[in-house]
Amino acid sequence: MPIDAAKALAAEPRSGEITWDRKDVQLYHLGIGAGIPATDPDELRYTLESRLHVLPSFATVAGAGSPGVISGLSMPGIEVDLAKVLHGGQNIELRRPIPVQGTATATSRIAAVYDKGKAAVLVLRTEVADADGPLWTNDAQIFVRGEGGWGGDRGPSTRLEPPTRDPDRTVERSIREDQALLYRLSGDWNPLHADPDFAKTAGFERPILHGLCTYGMTLKAVVDTLLGGDVTRVRSYATRFAGVVYPGETLRIRMWHTPEATRVAVSAVERDDAPVLADTVVEHS
């Protein structure tokens, strides 16, 4: 079996230094659709260095060479075909606001390996800290088709009961045709998001948008719509990637708000509201 769960779980964590600056932050924000309209004061917080703040989902790309989904596939005990890999879910826990520039140590390990029958799920955990202490923890759930069935632990269910009332707010966000090409400059070079031939090999009609791009677009919508544009209010952000998005489509983002947390559901408007993000929760102050 290409995945040796015991070996992967027993492997020593990998640590390395990561750095980022305002240009990395600005590029990430542009990659998730910030800056429209370009002179809007609310958008300038994402694009203009003199007003810049950092959307917490930047943690998924900070220090483009830091451990990520693709690097997680090179961990001991793991040897899989990249064309069979999908990002299944993502969770970020913030310890404090992310600075506009920084140097930190990222420590990554395989925290869990689950057997879903027809697929395996790897949980890649990355903990990041700088000289002042912990900054954030990232958990990426990596879905590998065709690698399950060895009789291992199925893992916990991440499914949440759907809300029983109408959403408090619904917004729509358009995805540019070149969105994936711009977003990948923040460090996710998986050809699935740019190469038509590779996308077809992986079973898609054309390149798809990065799930983490949709993830960032969604958090920005919640922050801007319900949190007064204050990125420091976000405590954690978790989602399950329920379906693909194609560049050029429109996201419909539904939000159910409480003082402590916001439930979110995201769908693709042009495909009869096909689910995109599910079981999504932003915890905040």
Image (tube, rainbow, N blue to C red):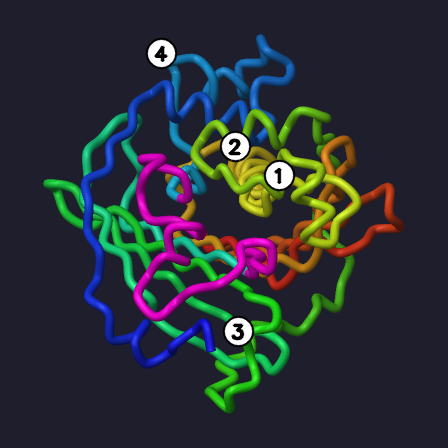
Question: Residue at the location (37% across, 13% down)?
Answer: 49
Real-space Cα separation, disc 2 to disc 4, in angstroms: 25 Å
Q: Which of marks 2 and 4 is in front?
A: 2
In the foreground, 230 or 91: 91
Residue 72 falls inside the magenta stretch:
yes
The residue that mark 3 highlights is 120
* Mark 4 residue element: helix
Q: Where is residue 80 in the image (x, y as percent from the top left)?
A: 49, 63
The residue that mark 2 highlights is 184
Q: What stretch is highlighted in magenta?
A: 60-88
Real-space Cα separation, disc 2 to disc 3, in angstroms: 25 Å
Question: Residue at the location (43% across, 13% down)?
Answer: 48
Real-space Cα separation, disc 4 to disc 1, in angstroms: 32 Å
Is residue 143 positioned above or below 170 on the image? below
In the foreground, 68 or 237: 68
Q: State how many labels appear.
A: 4
Q: Residue 193 carries which label?
A: 1
The residue that mark 4 highlights is 50
Tell me the amino acid under the disc marked 4.
Ser
* Mark 3 residue element: strand
Seen in the image, is 181 located left or right of residue 61? right
Q: Residue furthest bottom?
A: 151
Q: Which of marks 4 and 1 is in front?
A: 1
